[in-house]
Image (spheres, rainbow, N blue to C red):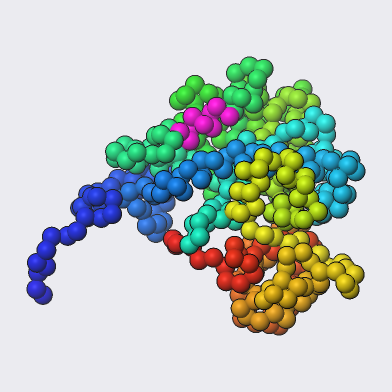
Amino acid sequence: MTPPTTAPRPLSGGISPETACEHSHAVKARLVAEGLHTNSTWRISPIPFRLAPESLAEIQTLGTHLLLFTRALNRLYSESARGSQPRWIADYLDQGKPSDLIAFARMNRFRDDTPRVIRPDLLLTETGLMITELDSVPGGIGITGCLAHAYSDLGWPIIGGRNGMVEGFAAMIKDLAADGPPVLAIVVSEEAKDYRPEMAWLAARLRETGLPAYALTPKDMNFTEDTLHLADGQAITVLYRFFELFDLKNIPKIELFFYAAKKGRVTLTPPAKPWLEEKMAFALLHHPVLESFWRDALNATAFETLRRLMPQTWILDPRPIPPHAVIPGLAPGGHPLSDYQEMARLGQKERRLRLLGTGLGVERGLGRARHGTTGMDRDPGASARLVSRFAAHPAGVPKGSAGIGPVPRSDRQ
């Protein structure tokens, strides 16, 4: 074989292939040492992900916009439940939720509580950012923090700084415990057990900052005289809920957690408010009847930005509408629809939709089907059955940013 006549070209990060290999091995070794890598077949980049300045600026403004949106959604639900907004809003958001959870979440003590961590799932497309989902119980906090340490120690500048993830989380917990120094329990359920190593990493780093923090299973918690405490008797003041509301029946001692929160013995975050974890929130933002509410609850910039970044979404409802009425904005190929069942008869190019299940029972019952399907366009019979199945329960149906048609292609895989 003829040897190459030119030296290897540097990678886009400005480092040589040899240095790139060293960096990748160093990052992997760090993850393995911290218990966050089990020799999985990950491809580890030698450099951190680079954001264009305009993308970074847009992301940095999203925090304030999403906080306003979450508070507005909380207000919209509460006003609907009281009857000062259309009651169908609360009816939709309550579907599939246990009545005891709804009663607990509606308690006046928790009226203004909202998640302190809001992670938008962002898709980089040819036309810019799109938000595919909002997650208030996100995984990745610990592993992202560890990666920030690893890349920073290799000399790379990290947005937020080397310890930004830990410091931000610590500040959030301290703000919740206004009555005194917090003692934090990060409670990770069995269903979320794959995330325990990274939450243990986070707890260890929090302790290094002077904040008592412990990553626990529900069974590790003890309860006496209205107080949750550790095995050594130390009282817990803040409980970070790292488990989904659809999994409550499988959480040991969940009644004790909620009782302690109801009595004010512990601060529960994120709050157990199912309406703040609903995929149909995007549909409410785009609903024409609610436009005046959103314009009043959000500032003009937040309203326009979120309406652009959150895909237009419809609540799939099997109830008939009058013959002369149509579903607002749902017009694939320029043909308005008056019945969701008509989607099953659309042509392949008109049916690039994603179906998302909603309601805690539906989340579990539909299993993987709830995570969306791009194969609707391949089998008309299967499409009809799938639409009918989802039509039995309200569900979100987001479309692409350019209308119903091809879903925006991501610039990166």
Residue 143, position as x, y percentages in the image: 46, 43
- Quadrant containing the C terminus is bottom left
Q: Quadrant of residue 340?
A: bottom right
Q: Quadrant of residue 265?
A: top right
- How many numbered discs? 0
Residue 229, position as x, y percentages in the image: 66, 26
Residue at the image position 70 percent from the left and 48 percent from the top: 277
Residue 67 sits inside the magenta stretch: no
Residue at the image position 39 percent from the left and 34 percent from the top: 162
Foreground residue, 276 or 223? 276
Q: Quadrant of residue 350?
A: bottom right
Residue 304 visible? The answer is yes
Foreground residue, 406 or 176? 406
Residue 168 sits inside the magenta stretch: yes
Residue at the image position 21 percent from the left and 55 percent from the top: 10
Q: Is residue 304 above or below residue 265?
A: below
Residue 316, position as x, y percentages in the image: 77, 64
Outermost residue, top side: 180
- Quadrant containing the N terminus is bottom left
Foreground residue, 18 or 214? 18
Residue 367 visible? The answer is no
Residue at the image position 73 percent from the left and 62 percent from the top: 314
Q: Is residue 158 above or below residue 132?
A: above
| Left or right relative to 104: residue 189 | left
Q: The magenta stretch spans which residues?
A: 164-172
Residue 148, position as x, y percentages in the image: 40, 40
Secondary structure, magenta segment, majority class: helix
| Left or right relative to 405: residue 226 | right
